[in-house]
Amino acid sequence: MSKLWGGRFTKATNELVEKETASIGFDYKLAEEDIQGSIAHVRMLAKSGIIDAEEADTIESGLHKVYDKFIQGKLAFSDANEDIHMNIEHALIEEIGPVGGKLHTGRSRNDQVATDMHLYLKKHTESLIVLMNDVQTAIYELAKQHTDTILPGYTHLQRAQPVSFAHHMLAYFWMFQRDKERLQDSLKRISWSPLGAGALAGTTFPIDREFTAEELGFNFVYPNSMDAVSDRDFILEFMSAASISMTHISRLSEEMVIWMSQEFQFIELDDSFCTGSSIMPQKKNPDVPELLRARTGRVNGNLVGLLTVLKGLPLAYNKDMQEDKEGMFDTVHTLTTSLQFLAPMIASMKVNTARMKEAVDTDFSNATDIADYLVEKDIPFRDAHEVIGKIVLHCIQHDQFLLDLTLADYQDFHPAFEADIFEKLKPASVLAARKSTGGTAPDAVIRQLNQAKTFID
């Protein structure tokens, strides 16, 4: 069949141009949304008296048949038809005859593709919010079991202060909560309807854009037709939110990789999320978190790619915008599968509480509490800090830890030390002392868990 736009042209499209400019190789993923938008459009055409009701019924019935073929895998796509819109329209005309050509009345591929992408992102963003909630639930359930489990907290990847394992994991809960809220907020912009904006200037037909917006579940109609067809902010916003979320996933994945190493042995991932070595039979490799860590680069790259595509584009639509889809599809897929991996991986993770306790018993992460102890005895913090530094240096030089010293040893460094210093330095005491809001004490963590529960379904 000839091109739907071929009336102006006297030569066939160059074969390489036809192949490289066709987008059907990836935008076939918009088939469902394209048909959904077309059904809303044809209903509006009938309601507005632009085509008669019988024609509209025939077209809508034909669109349902085309959709059934797509679902059954029987809908053939062709590069010659360029994109999903023209492939669907060709299939419709083959199904119902020339009346199918009336479907495109009052719209352009420019507002059509924008509508498809709004619908696509709306659907997948709503699904991603559910998946993010699943990850939060897995974190919450794990944290509930470990409010009293102590592990070393780190800064600069050096031992800092003991923390509750639940507290550590809940830090990610709140990261994902912000990610979820960013996605929820992005739906406000995704739920704008560009349908009816035409190529860039609207249409001469008496269309009802509010009607199609309502039919498609959109909350708002673009007030400016040029903005409607050239706007890709909603994709950029989604990709930005996805990049931030993947960064959080990557940080958690990195900790899983470190914690599972022989040097740490804080956790063990379930066999179903690990692989072995082809040459070293003893190996159990944390491949899934490694892949999640790496896939952050893909999502970040997609965001930067689209920002670069859009940065110099004049209004309104330009062919450059064909490059907006593959990155969007890949970002949706990557974030979706990453969240699908993450929830069960967290839920099945084994926590080595004994190893974590051994770690905090053999470090100096309780040193800050000695300083606090002296401050409570009215010694200036800076003076206390110097005293503790000397005590730690003494321990390092004599292969000891703070709880190995005697009271006489402590009093050699400062006479304010009394016998209660040893209770103060126990990891459980160090943990329990941090009761402030947002602190790591078990009581504070339980309050945090109660707060977290209100954010998950």
Image (cartoon, helix red, strand yellow):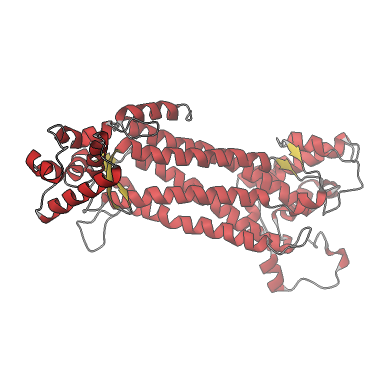
Choose between 224 and 372: the one closer to the eye.
372
182 with respect to 163 (left or right): right
The answer to which of 329 and 1 lies nearer the viewer is 329
Does residue 269 appear in this view? no
Left/right of residue 444 with respect to residue 279 in the rendered view: right
Q: Residue at x 72, y 46 (%)?
A: 115
Question: Looking at this view, is 295 or 271 the one in front?
Answer: 295
- Looking at the picture, how far across and down is residue 308, in whole percent? 63, 63
Residue at 26% x, 34% y: name it. Answer: 376
Is residue 388 toward the left or the right of residue 71 in the image? left
Q: Position of residue 290 (x, y in %)?
A: 37, 55
Is residue 312 something one can see in this rendering?
yes
Quadrant into which the N terminus falls: bottom right
Instruction: Please say if 117 is above or below 185.
Output: below
Residue shown at the point (51%, 49%) measured from the top left: 244
The number of numbered badges drawn on the structure is 0
Q: Which residue is more in the foreground, 298 or 24?
A: 298
Reply above or below: 429 against 331: above
**Residue 97, percent from left and from top:** 82, 48
Tell me which residue sits at (29%, 46%) in the image: 382
Residue 249 in picture, x, y percent from top left = 43, 48
